[in-house]
Image (spheres, helix red, strand yellow):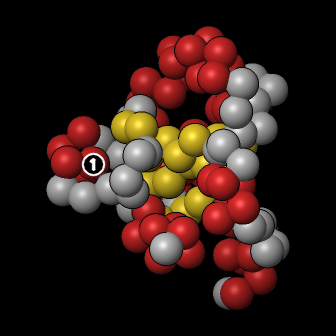
Amino acid sequence: MFSFFKKLFGPGTDYKALQQAGAIIIDVRSPQEFDRGHIKGSKNIPVNIIQREIAAIKKWNKPIITVCQSGARSGMAKSALKGAGIEVYNGGSWLSLRSKLD
């Protein structure tokens, strides 16, 4: 099971270093979920609209870290962004990533 998650989220990604280097965290949960708690400074772009926001995200010219509740939706968002040529990392659960950034 561990190797599955390692493949899903990437081995040893240093999210804190990515954030310090200017990466932008996109929380792909619904606005209601985002309002109940999120990583400070993250942007809320729900996974169901991420495709239409790609042009704007590309203009940021920054690496992206996607997060959601469990890692599934952020994985879908990562695929869409990567397919558009954006440097993107799946941060998995926002709560888990938040603890790595503190």
Where's residue 98, x and y in %? 46, 68
The residue nearer to you, when weighing 23 against 71, is 23
Q: In the image, what residue occupies the spot 81% across and 73% down?
A: 11
Q: Is residue 70 visible?
A: no
Q: Label 1 crowding class (10 Å Cα cut-off): few <14, some 14-19, many 20+?
A: many
Q: Is residue 69 above or below residue 100?
A: above
Q: Would you say 10 lies left or right of 93 here?
A: right
The residue nearer to you, when weighing 40 against 96, is 40
When asked about the image quadrant of residue 18, the answer is bottom right
Q: Which secondary structure lies at badge 1?
A: helix
Q: Is residue 67 above or below residue 58?
A: below
Q: In the image, what residue occupies the spot 63% across and 23% down?
A: 60
Q: Would you say 61 lies left or right of 60 here?
A: right
Where's residue 5, x and y in %? 68, 75
Q: Is residue 46 above or below residue 65?
A: above
Q: Would you say 93 lies left or right of 22 here?
A: left
Q: Residue furthest front?
A: 20
Q: Residue furthest bottom?
A: 2
The residue nearer to you, when weighing 76 against 94, is 94
Disc 1 marks which amino acid? Phe
How many marks the image carries: the answer is: 1
Q: In the image, what residue occupies the spot 43% across and 45% down?
A: 42
Give the quarter of the figure containing the N terminus.
bottom right
Q: Is residue 66 visible?
A: yes
Where's residue 7, x and y in %? 78, 69
Q: Is residue 30 above or below residue 80?
A: below
Q: In the image, what residue occupies the spot 72% across and 61% down?
A: 17
Residue, disc 1: 34
